[in-house]
Amino acid sequence: MMQDISGGPADDQRAASKSVLLNTFVVKKKRCRVYFHRGTLIWETERPPYTRWTLPLTNVLAVRYGDDWIPGVSVKEKQPAQPTSPTTVCPTNFILHYAVRGRKSKWRHHSVTMSHTDPRQVASWVKTIRNYLLGLTYRPRKVMLFINPIGGKKKGVKIWEKEVQPLMTIAGIETKMMVTEHAGHIRDALLTADLSDLHAVVCIGGDGTFAEVFNGLILRAAKDQQIDPNDPDVRLPSPALPVGVIPSGSTDTVAYSLHGTTDVQTAAIHIIFGDSIGLDISSVHSNVTLLRLYASVLSYGYLGDVISDSERFRWMGPRRYDWSGFKKIIANKGYEGEIELLSDPCHPAESTRCTKNCLRCQQHKYNSVCDEEISRLVTVSGKFFMVNGANVSCACSRSPMGFSPHCHVGDGCVDVILIRHTSLINNIRLLLRLSSKQKTLYELPFVEVYRARQFTFRALPMLQFENGLNATRSNSRFSVWNCDGEVIDSTNVKIRVHCQLLKVYTRRAQESI
Ligand SMILES: Nc1ncnc2c1ncn2[C@@H]1O[C@H](COP(=O)(O)OP(=O)(O)OP(=O)(O)O)[C@@H](O)[C@H]1O
């Protein structure tokens, strides 16, 4: 039984969403009744043992004709890629490519072949399913893809060839690919590239590569709209194109915080699905200069020292962080500074966790209350082991809870985590806590946590004692900022959160990571 209304592509898509199909196909050598109704495909065995599968079409990556053909029967079918040149095909099966969410938030590609003796039936089903998928207009069909060949374990190009390209081909996504040749390549390319016929920008790399993409896109949008990004109080424009991130870096915090895993196939499937969310982006200004935009974390003190030291050991791969981390924890003497922040009424420790369909993020998207009205000004000063502004939880495989597991990706706030300078033992306690799967930093007595809409940091000269008596101030002991894994030398900065400035592809993790 089938309802089929012919017309233009839009009519076809409308008809596909209303279609009801019912037929009997052979699936894995068993006769199955197959239904398609309201965007869901169901197939069940006709005879015992009865088994039933339900597949929402939003989980389908593509439908293709299989390689079983019979001669003499011809079915005229419009191929979507070449609508003007109909080809004659007589296939007797079709392959449905779909994705299933498994353990630990990982999605996997599967396929099922459905066979029927009548090619006209096969063609009708393929046409209806294809039209339904074409109706999911938020799915990207043409993307610009950047690969960082030196990030993480230098496997970016291999990841593209072995894991990402095959899935993109199955899904029929056209890609303009570019392998980066130097730092800053992506950002510079996006400032001038023709983006008019693209649906998305995708990168294969770590947090630094992702940061280049959104820094480039946001600066490009500002340039196009003649907005001065150096103005610290400016409302930055949202880029038109969503971004997909496929992890191949050393920490991959953003991918982990968005998808709940750094699994490459999962990230590619999220892009094909096309579901997106609004991600907060924070700007870092020094006086009237925009230094950088960040999505993960901005960190002064210990992590600043680690990132500036570890660049010299990039040849070690991700292990460079262990080496520099060890050296810098031993050497740490703390850094003096003053933080002034606009504190949100919601305290991170009492907040809900940010998962799929997060209420707090949805509410803040349409929030028109100005920051000053609901926030209060708080000033904290002292000597710190680290000062952090976390834009996302900053979870990664080494730190499953991250700096702030309750941080929200789209609530217009950063979680400010201040870690006081205490003892080496406490610093080690903190690092152990960061690698815990259950415990958070919130409970540690030398950690203070705030949720802020903006904050400033001013480094204070360190007190130095001469002859054990006279105290003088010295500028020699300043740290640097670690901004999404890149060094910022200016110590005095102003950070502002731009609520849901960037659209990123993800369905999010369904439950707390
Ligand atoms: N071809 C290239 N040569 C040198 N540097 C590059 C090249 N392409 C990109 N970069 C720079 O490499 C830096 C590191 O990249 P990325 O952050 O992706 O990897 P990572 O540091 O190993 O991972 P993570 O940030 O997740 O820890 C980025 O700052 C980027 O600007």
Image (tube, grey):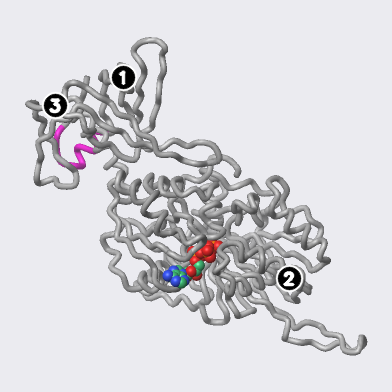
Distance from label 2 to label 3 (Cα)? 77 Å
**Amino acid type of the residue tagged 3 in the rendering:** Ile
Q: Residues within 10 Å of mark 2 (few under 14, many from 20)?
A: few
Badge nearest the viewer, 2 or 3: 3
Element on which disc 1 rests: loop
Distance from label 1 to label 3 (Cα)? 18 Å
Instruction: Identify the disc placed on residue 70.
Output: 3
Magenta stretch encompasses residue 305:
no
Mark 2 highlights which residue? 379
Instruction: Identify the disc placed on residue 29.
Output: 1
**Amino acid type of the residue tagged 1 in the rendering:** Lys
Position of the N terminus by quadrant: top left
What residue range appears in magenta?
6-16
**Is the CB of the residue bearing disc 1 within 8 angstroms of ligand 1?**
no
Residue projecting furthest to the front: 315
Q: Residues within 10 Å of mark 1 (few under 14, many from 20)?
A: few
Disc 2 to disc 3: CB gap under 8 Å:
no
Q: Residue at x 59, y 60 (%)?
A: 413
Vertical relation: 415 (above or below) 464:
above
Along the polypeptide, which appears first: circle 1 or circle 3?
1
Element on which disc 2 rests: strand
Q: Position of residue 288 (x, y in %)?
A: 53, 82
Distance from label 2 to label 1 (Cα)? 70 Å
**Amino acid type of the residue tagged 2 in the rendering:** Thr
